[in-house]
């Protein structure tokens, strides 16, 4: 893991195509984000969290999958489900993840949405945009153990991104300890595995107006 390189990748993500935020070239992939110990701890916290049913990618469609409620979760008629019966939660996944990933976050940005998505085999979510605000960023992280690094491409599980200009789709494989950062206005969709459960941490980042105002005063 090279923290400096990871930071530069994220902070410079709009340099080339910042005038075309829907351009799929603004999708940035960072591998080996955490060390082995943190990678294992994040996976364990994801497995042991509480999950809820009735979340929707699209308000006009039926709910799919399970989701945790950490930040920016709506108070709908959720049904709580533990995906592990034995559960003794000692740490909060949001606090742990936020602390560990803070060095990667673009300057003046902070989390406004944080959840873990859980999809069973052959459970299909819908395409959606995380935000219609140009400055918002989405950050996906694929939790998993180091020994899970082998990906059977026939199992599926990729995140698909839609290019609305060319009507084409590209996919990013959910390799454990991989992070994907992209403008939140890009339409995307998780794809399920054929025979395994699928976990991903899904977050959204907004630029902090207060931080920007302080920075302008100091300059």
Image (cartoon, grey):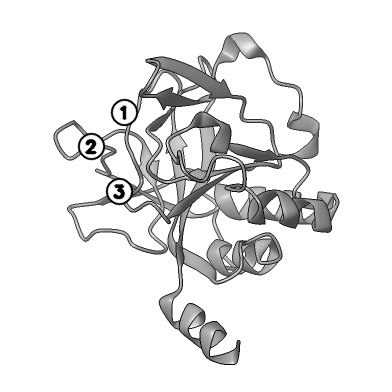
Pointers 3 and 2 in contact (C-beta within 8 Å) = no
Which of the marked residues, 3 or 1, is nearer the chain's N terminus?
1
Which of the marked residues, 2 or 1, is nearer the chain's N terminus?
2
Badge 2: few (under 14), some or many (20 or more) residues near its Cα, within 10 Å? Answer: some
Q: Residue at x 66, y 38 (%)?
A: 29
Q: Is residue 90 left or right of residue 118?
A: right
Q: Residue at x 17, y 52 (%)?
A: 77
Which of the marked residues, 3 or 2, is nearer the chain's N terminus?
2
Residue at label 3?
132
- Disc 3 from disc 1: Cα separation: 17 Å
**Which residue, as the protein is rendered here, is positioned at the far bottom?**
218
Residue at label 2?
58
Q: Is residue 153 above or below residue 208?
A: above
* SS at badge 2: loop
Residue 209: percent from left, percent from top: 42, 76
Looking at the rendered structure, the number of numbered marks drawn on it comes to: 3
Residue nearer the viewer, 108 or 17: 17
């Amino acid at each position: 893991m090279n923290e400096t390189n990871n930071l530069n990748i994220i902070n410079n993500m709009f340099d080339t195509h910042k005038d075309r935020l829907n351009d799929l070239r603004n999708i940035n992939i960072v591998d080996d984000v955490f060390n082995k110990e943190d990678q294992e701890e994040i996976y364990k916290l994801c497995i042991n969290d509480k999950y809820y049913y009735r979340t929707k990618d699209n308000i006009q469609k039926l709910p799919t999958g399970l989701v945790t409620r950490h930040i920016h979760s709506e108070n709908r008629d959720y049904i709580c489900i533990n995906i592990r019966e034995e559960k003794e939660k000692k740490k909060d996944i949001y606090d742990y993840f936020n602390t560990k990933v803070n060095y990667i976050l673009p300057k003046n940005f902070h989390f406004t949405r944080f959840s873990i998505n859980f999809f069973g085999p052959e459970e299909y979510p819908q395409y959606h945009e995380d935000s219609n605000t140009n400055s918002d960023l989405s950050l996906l992280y694929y939790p998993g153990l180091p020994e899970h690094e082998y990906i059977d491409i026939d199992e599926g599980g990729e995140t698909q991104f839609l290019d609305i200009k060319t009507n084409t789709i590209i996919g990013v494989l959910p390799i454990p300890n991989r992070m994907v950062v992209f403008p939140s206005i890009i339409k995307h969709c998780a794809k399920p595995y054929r025979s395994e459960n699928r976990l991903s941490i899904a977050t959204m980042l907004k630029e902090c107006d207060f931080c920007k105002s302080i920075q302008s005063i100091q300059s």
